[in-house]
Image: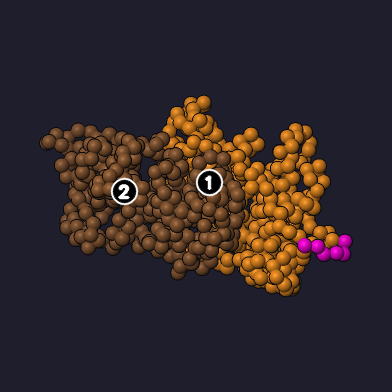
Chain colours: A brown, B orange
Amino acid sequence: VGGLFLSDDTVGDVGERALLAHFRRRIPVPPGVILGPGDDAAVLATGAVTLMTADAMVEGVHFRRAWSSPRQVGRKVLSVNLSDVGAMAGRARYATVSLCLPAALPVAWVEGLYDGLLERSAEVEVALVGGNVSGIEGPVVIDVALLGESARPLRRAGARPGDVLMVTGTLGLAAAGLALLQAGVQLPEDAALERACVRAHLDPDPPLAFAAALAEVDGVHAGMDLSDGLSGDLLALCAESGLAAVVHADALPLGPPLGAGDPLELALHGGEDYQLLLAVDPARADALRALAARHDLRLTAVGACAAGPPAVWLERDGTRTPLPPHAHQHFTPREADGT
Amino acid sequence: VGGLFLSDDTVGDVGERALLAHFRRRIPVPPGVILGPGDDAAVLATGAVTLMTADAMVEGVHFRRAWSSPRQVGRKVLSVNLSDVGAMAGRARYATVSLCLPAALPVAWVEGLYDGLLERSAEVEVALVGGNVSGIEGPVVIDVALLGESARPLRRAGARPGDVLMVTGTLGLAAAGLALLQAGVQLPEDAALERACVRAHLDPDPPLAFAAALAEVDGVHAGMDLSDGLSGDLLALCAESGLAAVVHADALPLGPPLGAGDPLELALHGGEDYQLLLAVDPARADALRALAARHDLRLTAVGACAAGPPAVWLERDGTRTPLPPHAHQHFTPREADGT
């Protein structure tokens, strides 16, 4: 590991302070960072409006070391936060990372985690500006706080009756991937669809460039990211906007049937899609489709907003039934929430 | 607990989502918060320069439920971050709080934690703008990310040979308090000094108003907060500023002898003082003393900066000896670091 530590060193052997000093040297200082890691606080260039969110990943709850490489964990903990800033029509800029590491954890695992954090932050031009490393008598915990900016933040409130509901990407892939991992299926090399689902769970890829571009588009009245599953997330949007919604089952962008669950159920209730749910003025839907096409992104109209008390209805074969929220269950109930 | 939960409910009984919704209702929305908790990210009014820091507290490492009330834990996790922003001559504004809570944790404990977070944030006019709650198969973890602002951020770098080294408050009290707790001493009601030490450990009170005022004072060349003990922290300041320092043992503002360790040793090496260490132009030392007096704060000249490779020397009875860093050891090595 960088020539500094032995290959079988643990966090306890090396000490958290030495680890922190080691990894700090790897962290670049991009534009906007007036003062990076190493002082009592970072000093950052910001605009008049700043977005702020934080989301943690806990070993045994959000990831397992048997399934995820440390690089994937590092990438994902940034991605889930990037998705939140993107959902505000924002562009992410600065992140802090708090690590809780058990003494027996191999240093090589921490090195892999930093590989993922550095790789992902470089991809999206986010500066890692600080954080802390602490011991823990328990699982690995990684908490990221992320700052971003948006000329016009997109909220969950603001949807209007008659708005078209649109989603990016394909829904239910990550939940299918998790189901495959939980079933312990050994995937053959040529199982490309299955592998894509597993990758969607382990290394999500939110549509960040499209999301940031939404700040410059008229007619997008409300939006959020799909992290807990469409049924629950759409109900949250309805509650914030004070209206109801109808989802057309036939219109949903489903994943392929893989024996990992019914694709419709996975699309409705599976979590961790990290795609966008948008409420759009129907007159602007085509313009939004054109924007998505420029970003090489699938964008699908899946329903509409309607006046009424907050509720989600599923229309299927000509009949409407209530669609109760059925939030994605992680290993244990996953309740980490946005903001 | 607010009439919503039963008095013996656990986090597992109630679910993290219900807890989050419950506590969100208690959070006020102060000025500057354009959009508070509940969306994908908070939207905050910021200036051209923003300070950012994050620091976590881990049960069993930074606190014990047997020693700290949940209210004290909530206050302290904010205070240690407030101290970092203060040390940059900053004023804190916005915080996110990430909680990892084991299922067996009583809801009443979480309620107490929020009491402390809300009470402390109100005292210092910091807005709680978001965060997340997650399960954990392990100890309680609380991570706070804090934003602040400063017209002129104070760094660790910038001290000059000849600068007077000054510290606020009394050093070693928190370390003495921790030693008393670790010794299991039952303190009588009238043991005011001992109780003050225990309080310094459980509920630190960094000099935040004085710290923020430093941005308007000339001649303060460098500064940091004392979190790991003077010996190690001063060496960090020396390293960042590229010089050496001499500490006069006779000048240190020591705590009283309480049988909890030698006051000099506690002042030199005890951690968690959350006081300020400043390198000051000697010509401005009196002006700084006057500022401290206006804040009803003890400010003591304890040594001086000198040209030379980064090192700390202790002058005692006319002789100088090297003062190696001997960082404060928490229950397990505490390595959480600033920024």
Circle 1 sits in a helix, a strand or a loop, which is it? loop
- Residue B199: where, in percent of width, then height? 69, 43
Q: How crowded is mark 1: few (under 14 residues within 10 Å), some or many (20 or more)?
A: some
Q: Name the residue under label 1.
A: A105
Residue at the limit of the structure toward the right, as seen here = B317
Whether residue B66 is visible:
yes
Amino acid type of the residue tagged 2 in the rendering: Ala
- Residue B292: where, in percent of width, then height? 71, 61
B79 or B44: nearer the viewer: B79
In the picture, the disc for residue A184 is none
> What residue appears at the point 22 percent right and 44 percent down from the top-left corner?
A255
Q: Does the magenta stretch include residue B320?
A: yes
Whether residue A244 is visible:
no
Q: Do labels 1 and 2 share a chain?
A: yes
**C-alpha gap between disc 1 and disc 2:** 26 Å
> What residue appears at the point 34 percent right and 55 percent down from the top-left corner?
A86
* Chain ID of residue with mark 2: A
A319 or A219: nearer the viewer: A319
- Residue A17: where, in percent of width, then height? 60, 54
> What residue appears at the point 43 percent right and 33 percent down from the top-left corner?
B15
Highlighted magenta segment, given as a residue range: B317-322
Q: Does the magenta stretch include residue B292?
A: no
First in sequence: mark 1 vs mark 2: 1
Q: Mark 2 points at which residue?
A: A200
| Rendered view: B151 above or below A1 | below
| Rendered view: B148 above or below A69 | below
Q: Nearer the viewer, mark 1 or mark 2?
A: 1
The count of marks equals 2
Side of A275 where B181 appears, left or right: right
> What residue appears at the point 22 percent right and 63 percent down from the top-left corner?
A294
Side of A104 where B202 appears, left or right: right
Question: Quadrant location of residue A57?
Answer: top left
